[in-house]
Image: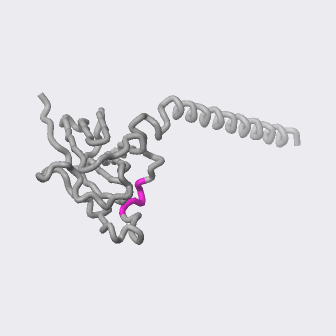
């Protein structure tokens, strides 16, 4: 039986979003269940099962939240329900500390500094690269396959044109 452990989960926030990073490389077979009050995550890497469950301090909007597997880590952008409220005092509802949960100091800013430093640490967090919890966001494999096939066809056409031009050039040289 494989061992299951909690991965390191780092978090930061802005007035409207929570940013989570699961710090494990090459995670496969991710199972993600997001509700307005909790996140359940499980995956495996190199024969080890990783899992955690977080009950949020306040509610998030599932439909506006996104996640993606970057290979070196798994990232979540969770949209806060009450965006007019101040920063959450903690990520989890419970008051006890979860050993695997850490502040992401590369993204951390004080609430008062958000106007000046709001993008700190988020340069490579392009939300367009994330998928929604309803499956929207990233292209599905059929669309990617179709695009790849179109690119291959275009490359073949270009190669045929180059070959035709090359043959014309050779014929002109022979005719001289």
Q: Is residue 77 visible?
A: no
Magenta segment, prevailing SS (helix, strand or loop): loop
Q: Quadrant of residue 26?
A: top left
Q: Which residues are magenta?
A: 121-125
Residue at x 48%, y 47% (from the top left corner) = 128
Q: Position of residue 121 (x, y in %)?
A: 36, 62
56, 70: nearer the viewer: 56
Determine whether, in the image, residue 30 is placed left or right of residue 158: left
Residue 148 lies in the magenta-colored region: no
Above or below: residue 12 compared with residue 75: below
Direction from residue 85 to residue 102 in the image, left or right: left
Residue at the extreme right of the image, as rendered: 176
Classify residue 35 by image quadrant. top left
Q: Position of residue 33 (x, y in %)?
A: 30, 35
In the image, taking residue 90 as reference, residue 117 lies left or right, namely right
Q: Residue at x 27, y 49 (%)?
A: 58
Location of residue 27 with respect to 114 vertically, above or below: above
How many numbered discs sit on the rendered protein?
A: 0
* Quadrant hosting residue 36: top left
Between residues 122 and 36, which one lies in front from this camera angle?
36
What residue lies at 46% left-to-right and 37% top-to-bottom? 136
């Amino acid at each position: 039986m494989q061992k299951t452990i909690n991965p390191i989960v780092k978090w930061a926030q802005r007035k409207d979003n929570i940013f989570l990073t699961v710090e494990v490389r090459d995670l496969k077979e991710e199972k993600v269940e997001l509700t307005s009050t909790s996140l359940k995550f499980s995956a495996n890497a190199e024969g080890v099962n990783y899992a955690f469950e977080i009950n949020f301090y306040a509610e998030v909007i599932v439909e506006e939240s996104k996640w993606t597997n970057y290979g070196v880590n798994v990232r979540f952008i969770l949209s806060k329900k009450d965006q007019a409220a101040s920063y959450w005092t903690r990520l989890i509802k419970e008051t006890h500390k979860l050993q695997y949960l850490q502040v992401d100091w590369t993204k951390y800013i004080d609430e008062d500094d958000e106007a000046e430093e709001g993008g700190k640490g988020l340069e490579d967090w392009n939300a367009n690269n994330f998928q929604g919890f309803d499956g929207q966001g990233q292209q599905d494999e059929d669309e990617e396959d179709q695009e790849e096939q179109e690119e291959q066809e275009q490359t073949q056409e270009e190669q045929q044109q180059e070959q035709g031009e090359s043959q014309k050039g050779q014929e002109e040289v022979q005719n001289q």
